[in-house]
Image: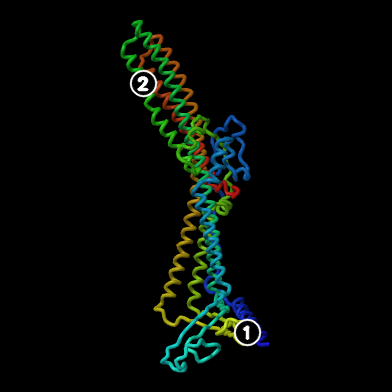
């Protein structure tokens, strides 16, 4: 009967505490997501290249679904392979995964504070009193349930529990903050992923551009050597001066001197891609050293609406979650101004004889509430509330800055991609004209109607034009990658 009343009392006590906790208010501000006005459309969305590409596949605009795996619009199997490998083995992405697990565990710790804690206890004590305390008569007989011996045993076993009743919501605000921080970490992982995808694609485009520059340089060296052979033959026949031979030899050597730097940059690009894949620097040397074309993407990418961009970009979502976390921390700090109520209880058995430990007469228990209320702390709690308020305002300012940066990056990427395509078209026409000039000056020189200096000038102009065209082709693809990054592309890659 006693155990029944004890259990009933504990049950009623904890039920009453749960009702108080549930009915309690949550101090601090209730979070409202920021609602910054977004432009109705991107100003540069209507800016497009003046001429469409001849390839109809490149002229087709990607659909929103294709933006999720935007790298596939380049139609480059090697690029697809590298990006898929990077999403599983990049060390930075693995670190972001571990941060998610860390914040998930911290959320679990915060949530556990809402519930009671129960500890099992057990102890055994053998003690001996001093002879001078009396009552023992010099006897050393072990006590057995209250005897007069100097030595005694004490066996104890039981449970103790404590529960902080969250009447003013400090614990709940802590859980709210931890959850928002966890969600921000998930968005940060997505931001890391998008940056990784862009870095792999940009480095790959640069690699293919460098390989194309090497090929152009080698083609020019071959052409210049053929011209050198012709001039040497004419020199032996007395038709041209030694100066022409020397000038052409210098031209060949100057062109050949550009190869070592280009080859070093190729190796460095391969090293960088390998590191992004979590591999040793030279791991992809054999796989990537074979030249390939510079990947080309679609002619135009629809950016959608700015409001969609703000919902899609993980850095914007992360900044918003940071505001939510900071707002909840104000409630955590404010709750310190109010009393903290707790329930503590103990139930167990104790006896001087082990075989009597779990006897009904060996039980003991205690249960009761407690309250603590800060009376004087020199204003430290209020100062902490002020700190949390400033942190929330800082988080909001950071959110505004992130939004503006995302809009700027998109506008910049749109105009850069469109105008670089126009520049590439003009350079293509310029290279065709340079090739005709080289052919014309060579014919005039062979017929004695022009000097060899004009031939050298035409060759140098053609080489510079071809290199500029290659850099422009590389930059067009790099600008497209930057546009995909600005749009938050790649946000639904399987995790």
Crowding around mark 2 (Cα neighbors within 10 Å: few <14, some 14 to 19, many 20+) is some
Residue 108, horizontal then vertical, whole percent: 56, 65
In primary-sequence order, the first of circles 1 and 2 is: 2
Residue position marked by numbered label 2 in the rendering: 251
Residue position marked by numbered label 1 in the rendering: 359
Q: Residue at x 51, y 53 (%)?
A: 96
Q: Residue at x 37, y 18 (%)?
A: 454
- Near-viewer residue (260 or 388): 260
Q: Is residue 465 above or below residue 136?
A: above
Query: With 449 as the anchor, is 350 left or right in this view?
Result: right
Crowding around mark 1 (Cα neighbors within 10 Å: few <14, some 14 to 19, many 20+) is few
| Label 1 residue SS | loop
Q: Is residue 434 above or below residue 73?
A: above
- Which residue lies most toward the top here? 237
Q: Is residue 167 visible?
A: no
**Circle number at residue 478:** none
Q: Residue at x 57, y 31 (%)?
A: 53
Disc 1, disc 2: CB below 8 Å?
Answer: no
Q: Residue at x 48, y 39 (%)?
A: 203
Marks 1, 2: nearer the viewer = 1
Residue 135, horizontal then vertical, whole percent: 47, 94
- Near-viewer residue (275 or 31): 275
């Amino acid at each position: 009967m006693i155990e029944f009343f004890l259990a009933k009392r504990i049950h009623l006590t904890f039920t009453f505490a749960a009702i108080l906790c549930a009915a309690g208010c949550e101090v601090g501000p209730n979070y409202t997501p920021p609602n910054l006005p977004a432009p109705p459309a991107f100003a540069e969305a209507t800016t497009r290249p003046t001429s469409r590409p001849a390839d109809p596949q490149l002229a087709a605009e990607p659909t929103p679904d294709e933006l999720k795996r935007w790298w596939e619009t380049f139609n480059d199997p090697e690029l697809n392979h590298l990006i898929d490998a990077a999403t599983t083995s990049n060390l930075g992405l693995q670190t972001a995964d571990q941060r998610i697990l860390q914040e998930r565990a911290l959320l679990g710790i915060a949530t556990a504070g809402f519930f009671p804690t129960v500890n099992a206890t057990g102890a055994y004590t053998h003690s001996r009193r001093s002879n001078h305390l009396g009552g023992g008569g010099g006897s050393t007989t072990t006590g057995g349930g209250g005897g007069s011996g100097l030595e005694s045993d004490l066996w104890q076993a039981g449970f103790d529990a404590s529960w902080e009743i969250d009447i003013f919501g400090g614990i709940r605000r802590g859980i709210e903050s931890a959850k928002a921080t966890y969600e921000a970490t998930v968005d940060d992982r997505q931001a890391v992923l998008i940056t990784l995808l862009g870095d792999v694609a940009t480095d790959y485009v640069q690699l293919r551009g460098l390989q194309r520059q090497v090929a152009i340089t080698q083609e020019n060296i071959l052409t210049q050597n053929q011209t050198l052979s012709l001039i040497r033959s004419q020199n032996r026949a007395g038709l041209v001066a030694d100066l022409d031979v020397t000038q052409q030899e210098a031209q060949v050597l100057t062109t050949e001197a550009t190869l070592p730097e280009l080859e070093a940059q190729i190796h460095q690009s391969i090293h960088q891609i390998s590191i992004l894949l979590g591999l040793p620097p030279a791991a992809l040397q054999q796989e990537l050293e074979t030249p390939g074309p510079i990947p080309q993407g679609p002619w135009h990418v629809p950016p959608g609406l700015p409001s969609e961009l703000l919902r899609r970009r993980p850095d914007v979502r992360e900044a918003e979650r940071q505001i939510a976390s900071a707002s909840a921390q104000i409630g955590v700090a404010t709750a310190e101004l109010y009393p903290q109520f707790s329930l503590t209880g103990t139930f167990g058995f104790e006896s001087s004889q082990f075989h009597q430990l779990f006897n009904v007469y060996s039980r003991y228990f205690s249960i009761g509430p407690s309250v603590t209320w800060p009376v004087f702390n020199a204003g430290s709690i209020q100062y902490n509330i002020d700190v949390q308020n400033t942190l929330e305002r800082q988080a909001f300012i950071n959110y505004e800055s992130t939004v503006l940066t995302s809009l700027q990056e998109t506008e910049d990427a749109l105009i850069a991609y469109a105008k670089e395509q126009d520049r590439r078209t003009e350079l293509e026409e310029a290279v065709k004209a340079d090739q005709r000039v080289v052919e014309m000056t060579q014919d005039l020189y062979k017929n004695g109607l022009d000097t060899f200096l004009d031939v050298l000038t035409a060759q140098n102009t053609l080489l510079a034009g071809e290199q500029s065209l290659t850099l422009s082709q590389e930059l067009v693809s790099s600008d497209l990658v930057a546009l995909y990054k600005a749009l938050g592309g790649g946000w639904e890659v399987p995790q």
